[in-house]
Image: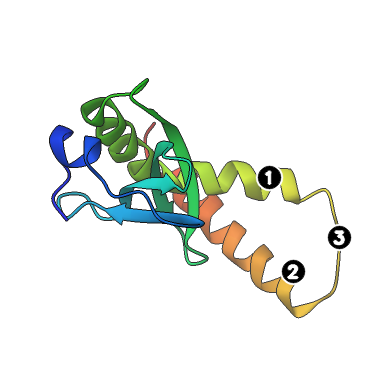
């Protein structure tokens, strides 16, 4: 769906739960509409397809939310690096933690080798 100010304003409200409308112009960026009619700008990222809320409509404009999403998506390696550092406090020998450790090391190497 091509998100414009008019389409965001007129998005259908779901009967129950939430519905996310993703933008054709920017992959991962969208608007989540709740059954109460509340609209929030979101960005989906990572293998786990996590959602980050950027702000509520109409407090935040479509243009500013789209720019924030572009900035966030460009900075994902640094964002993941920060969370890898925070999760390094725990220690485990599980296969999942070994995979996470390997991934975090690769992200750290990438972040350290790219200019800020």
* Rendered-image quadrant of the C terminus: top left
Badge 1: residue crowd in 10 Å (few <14, some 14–19, many ≥20): few
Disc number placed over residue 97 in the picture, else none: 2
Residue at 41% x, 39% y is: 37
**Residue 14 in the image: x percent, y percent?**
40, 55
- Cα–Cα gap, marks 3 and 1: 12 Å
Q: Answer yes or no: do the residues labelled 2 and 3 have beta carbons within 8 Å?
A: yes
Residue at 47% x, 39% y is: 53
Which residue is identified by label 3? Answer: 91
**Residue 81 in the image: x percent, y percent?**
56, 46
- Cα–Cα gap, marks 1 and 2: 13 Å
Label 1 vs 2, first from the N-terminus: 1
Badge 2: residue crowd in 10 Å (few <14, some 14–19, many ≥20): some
Badge 3: residue crowd in 10 Å (few <14, some 14–19, many ≥20): few
Horizontal side of residue 83 vs 86, given as left or right: left
For label 3, the SS is loop
In this view, the residue in front, 84 or 113, is 84
Disc number placed over residue 85 in the picture, else none: 1
* Rendered-image quadrant of the N terminus: bottom left
Horizontal side of residue 7 vs 12, given as left or right: left
Horizontal side of residue 114 vs 86, given as left or right: left
**Residue 62 in the image: x percent, y percent?**
24, 31
For label 2, the SS is helix
């Amino acid at each position: 769906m091509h998100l414009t100010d008019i389409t965001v304003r007129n998005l259908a409200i779901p009967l129950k739960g939430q519905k996310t409308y993703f933008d054709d112009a920017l992959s991962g960026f969208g608007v989540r509409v709740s059954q109460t009619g509340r609209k929030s700008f979101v960005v989906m990222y990572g293998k786990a397809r996590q959602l980050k809320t950027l702000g509520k409509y109409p407090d935040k404009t479509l243009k500013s939310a789209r720019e924030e999403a572009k900035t966030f998506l460009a900075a994902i390696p640094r964002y993941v690096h920060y969370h890898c550092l925070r999760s390094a406090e725990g220690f485990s020998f599980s296969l999942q933690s070994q995979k996470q450790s390997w991934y975090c090391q690769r992200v750290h190497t990438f972040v350290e080798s790219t200019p800020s």
